Image (cartoon, rainbow, N blue to C red):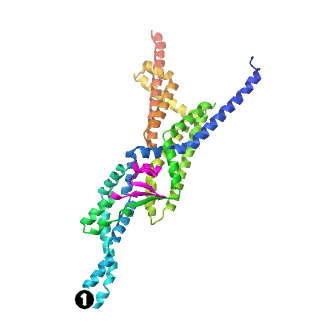
Amino acid sequence: MADPPGPARAGRRPRGRRTRYAVASVLLLLAFVLSPLAVVATWANSQVADTDRYVRTVAPLAKDPSVRKGVTDRLTAHVVDNVDVDGISAALSNALARADAPPGIVDKSHLLAGPLKNAVTSAVREVIDKVVTSDRFAEAWDGANRRAHAALVKTLTGEGSGAVEARGDAVVLDLGTVVDEVQRELVDAGFEKAARIPDTDRTITLFETDKLDEAQDAMRLLNTLGVWLPVIVVALAALAVWASPAHRVTLVAASAGIGVMMIVLLVGLAVARRVYLDSVPADVLPPDAAASVYDTFVRFLRDGTRTVLVAAVVTALAGYLYGPGRGARFVRAVSTRSTGATGRAMARSGLRTGATGHWLEGHRKWTTGVVIGASALTLFLWNHPTPAAVALVLGVAVLVMAVLAVLGAASAADGANGAEDRVRRPRRE
């Protein structure tokens, strides 16, 4: 069949471009929606799979003043509740009566119960505070969490057992090993009753919500997809850039969109923090301790979100600098003049790059693409990158491209100097 007339072929091209734009838009929309889930899933997966990272997550709680105060208050109350202060005051009254003490003193001996309880509370608190604020407490905390790393699996999936576990609508932390250490210190200090701290009182509620089952279902799904969601998001964004007729514009749009979604995720974490603090009763966990628990548990998630945000901003900026905008042209012109001047200075000083420099000058686009691709791959394979890691990779990439440009400019200046010498030599003869 013969090709249709020219106008028909021309009319087919805009429709094809619209189709490609539509496909790219759908792919970008999917990437935008999945990007926050990918960050959360990666964080959840890393917490489950990496014991050292999990211990680093919970370790600061052992040194947080508000958490230490909460632990001290809870254990002090448990010990004092097991001290029969009323029985002691009654025994004192009986002893005074048998010793023929004045009736007024015997009748008022029960008033000693309050001061006696305060004295016991003060003494017990001093011993417990000494333990909780010591390095031994931090070591016991880290050791217990390391041995019970499977506890995080139970927190997220509701399966298994460990120091952190889900009980009904609450997530609790078992302080059994810490309580044992406190008991030994108290018994050594003369408080034999401390050995009777009930096992049922060895826990601290970290989270309490009637939506725990739904949250566990969501976290199980995110944990399952934790490895693949980031790959899917990157693949969707790359396919969108490839399918779009305007590759550079689509790359900028993809980076900007993912950056916006990271901002939305950070806002969501701030809102979730407020909801969490409002949902935790003050008698379960003091507000300052609850805030410390939340901030400690999600700090790596915040760091990961900020890292993706910084990477997205850098990618969008790079895409803009390769465009036709006035600012982009100015930046490129300044960088070209700078590297060219440096290269010419090298050539004049005798530092010539020869064939290597000529090759670099002739393949500048290819070498630039390799540097950018290697930088992106480095960040993608980096184990838990941070915004500082993004800045480091960016700095190295810019430095490498600048060095390659200078080497190429030095070869060009070398060739120009050689041609000038050949022109001047006949004149001298």
In what quadrant of the picture does the C terminus appear? Answer: top left
Stretch of the chain drawn in magenta: 150-176
Q: Residue visible at 34% across and 54% down? A: 141
Name the one closer to the observer, 361 or 263.
Answer: 263
Residue 107 found in image quarter: bottom left
Position of residue 357 relative to residue 252, above or below, is above
Evaluate whether residue 418 shows in this view: yes
Q: Is residue 63 above or below residue 83?
A: above
* Callout 1 secondary element: loop
* Residue corresponding to mark 1: 101
Question: Position of 22 compared to 35: left or right?
Answer: right
Q: Residue 385 appears at what percent x and percent y?
A: 44, 41
| Residue for point 71% across, 30% down | 15
Q: Is residue 399 left or right of residue 118?
A: right
Residue positioned 58% across, 33% down in the render: 239
Task: Decide: is 261 above or below 205.
Answer: above
Q: Is residue 72 magenta?
A: no
Q: Whole-percent x and y of residue 419?
A: 48, 15
Q: Nearer the viewer, residue 352 or 397?
A: 397
Other residues around mark 1 within 10 Å, as few (<14) / some (14–19) / many (≥20): few
Extreme residue in the top direction: 429
Does residue 269 show up? Answer: no
Is-magenta flag for residue 174?
yes
Residue 291 image offset from top left, x and y in percent: 46, 58
Spot the residue most to the left: 99
Residue 404, percent across and down? 46, 27
As shown in the figure, which amino acid type bears the numbered disc 1? Ala
